[in-house]
Image (cartoon, helix red, strand yellow):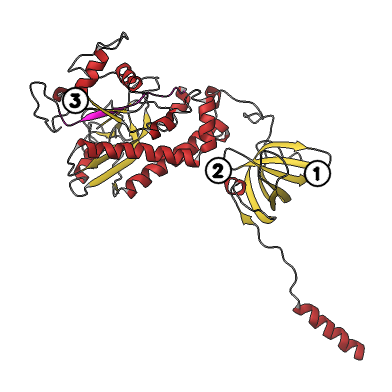
């Protein structure tokens, strides 16, 4: 009887002591895991795709990437985890302890306690091969997989950061974001060849328009923004734009994203140019600060020899010259231009490139254009006999880039540029 009471008391004592439990794993992106400071064996969970597998007698090394960073996270596991399913391209979920890495070139590594293969990958059939740098034209055949490569992943991360920086700049500057329509009846001053929008042949009604008038994919949101600027003093849009120009050059894209803005009550062109220069420099600084490794990769493989150009732009104020001064500079140039520079004629790409080079590889505002070259509503400078207007263009020299890269990205002065001029 006494023994039974003692046993019962012991059981009650044991039941009152909490059982040790593992803390739930914190889910981290590869970028956050690599940037962790003062790691001390925290339990984390990382999900991504295997970039490499290296099996040794007692240790298994994996490199896992989830697209958040150019660099992959090294996973160290016991050799008992080794499996045919742990192959290049497979998607995995790894749980374990984030610890300091004894290896050079990396701050942390993940000591795996559990590895789950979420999706298998047949290495032989997989079109991307380990340690092989595939040509961009080859990658175009696999649009669903090409974003896993370093080059395309870097470009898309830079694009994402630049887009966020553009929106942040305009928001901080008091602009209202306007979603201008993608389908519109506006030709926007003949800005480019149009894609016409019609119903499919199954429901098409002969001799009638679906919207009662011909409708097109937008070539510009300018006219809609001008309407909005009658109610909001500062507005902008950043959306898809379409041009039906049947050309295979890097300057002609069927679809691209374009930034457009309108400001009411401007007192001088200088105010407008300050906004434009601020936008360029803010977006550039944001990209350089957040995507250092991605930018380095672009400088190495996409635009070699151009590493210092963005830093050079950030250190100097953009220059301002008049159209008349630009023509005089071009006339005195020793180069033989395809198009002879003359007052009253538009500036061509070759002229823009020379002006930027002449001015020290700094973006240049060319202002006070001839009245005949600009739309009717531009403000008259009343400076006859050579009639000029309150308008201009920002020119910059483009960085070299393959067409297959430019077709994925169009944003002036942040990456390899498909365009060299921004009109205002």
Q: Secondary structure at mark 1?
A: helix
Give yes or no for residue 394 being in the magenta stretch.
yes
From the image, tell me which residue sits under label 3.
Answer: 369
Which label's residue is closer to the chain start, 1 or 2? 2
Residue 184 appearing in the image? no
How much space separates mark 3 and mark 1, taking CA atoms? Answer: 71 Å
Which label's residue is closer to the chain start, 3 or 1? 1
The front one of 164 and 85 is 164
Q: Which mark is residue 68?
A: 2
From the image, tell me which residue sits under label 1.
Answer: 79
The image quarter containing residue 70 is top right
Residue 414 appearing in the image? yes
28 w.r.t. 398: above or below: below
Image coordinates of residue 129 in percent, x first then y, are: 65, 28
Q: Secondary structure at mark 3?
A: loop
In the image, the segment drawn in magenta is 389-401
The image quarter containing residue 353 is top left
Principal SS element in the magenta part? loop
Task: Give the left or right position of residue 42, taking residue 227 as reference.
Answer: right
How much space separates mark 1 and mark 2, taking CA atoms? Answer: 28 Å
The front one of 283 and 322 is 322
* Mark 3 surroundings: few (<14), some (14-19) or many (≥20) residues within 10 A: many
* Mark 1 surroundings: few (<14), some (14-19) or many (≥20) residues within 10 A: some
The N terminus lies in which quarter of the figure?
bottom right
């Amino acid at each position: 009887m006494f023994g039974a009471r003692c046993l019962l008391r012991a059981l009650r004592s044991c039941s009152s002591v909490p059982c040790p439990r593992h803390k739930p794993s914190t889910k981290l992106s590869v970028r956050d895991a690599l940037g962790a400071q003062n790691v001390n064996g925290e339990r984390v969970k990382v999900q991504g795709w295997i970039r490499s597998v290296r099996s040794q007698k007692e240790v298994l090394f994996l490199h896992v990437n989830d697209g958040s960073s150019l660099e992959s996270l090294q996973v160290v596991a016991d050799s008992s985890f080794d499996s045919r399913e742990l192959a290049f391209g497979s998607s995995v979920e790894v749980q374990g302890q984030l610890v300091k890495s004894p290896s050079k070139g990396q701050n942390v590594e993940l000591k795996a306690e559990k590895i789950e293969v979420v999706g298998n990958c047949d290495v032989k059939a997989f079109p991307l091969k380990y340690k092989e740098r595939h040509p961009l034209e080859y990658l175009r055949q696999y649009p669903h997989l090409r974003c896993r490569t370093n080059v395309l992943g870097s470009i898309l991360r830079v694009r994402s950061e630049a887009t966020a920086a553009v929106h942040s700049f305009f928001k901080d500057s008091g602009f209202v974001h306007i979603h201008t329509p993608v389908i519109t009846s506006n030709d926007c001053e003949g800005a480019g060849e149009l894609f016409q929008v019609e119903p499919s042949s199954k429901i098409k009604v002969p001799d009638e328009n679906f919207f009662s008038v011909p409708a097109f994919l937008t070539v510009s949101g300018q006219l809609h923004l001008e309407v909005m600027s009658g109610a909001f003093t500062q507005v902008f849009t950043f959306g898809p734009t379409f041009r039906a120009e049947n050309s295979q050059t890097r300057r002609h894209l069927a679809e691209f994203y374009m930034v457009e803005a309108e400001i009411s009550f401007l007192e001088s062109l200088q105010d407008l140019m300050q906004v434009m220069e601020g936008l360029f420099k803010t977006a550039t600084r944001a990209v350089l600060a957040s995507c250092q490794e991605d930018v380095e990769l672009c400088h190495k493989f996409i635009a070699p020899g151009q590493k210092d150009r963005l830093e050079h732009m950030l250190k100097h104020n953009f220059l301002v010259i008049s159209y008349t001064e630009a023509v005089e500079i071009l006339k005195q140039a020793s180069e033989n231009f395809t198009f002879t520079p003359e007052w009253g004629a538009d500036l061509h790409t070759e002229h823009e490139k020379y002006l930027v080079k002449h001015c020290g590889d700094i973006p240049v505002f060319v202002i006070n254009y001839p009245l005949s070259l600009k739309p009717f509503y531009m403000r008259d400078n009343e400076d006859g006999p050579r009639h000029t207007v309150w308008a201009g263009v920002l020119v910059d020299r483009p960085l070299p880039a393959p067409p297959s890269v430019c077709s994925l990205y169009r944003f002036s002065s942040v990456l390899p540029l498909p365009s060299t001029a921004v009109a205002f």
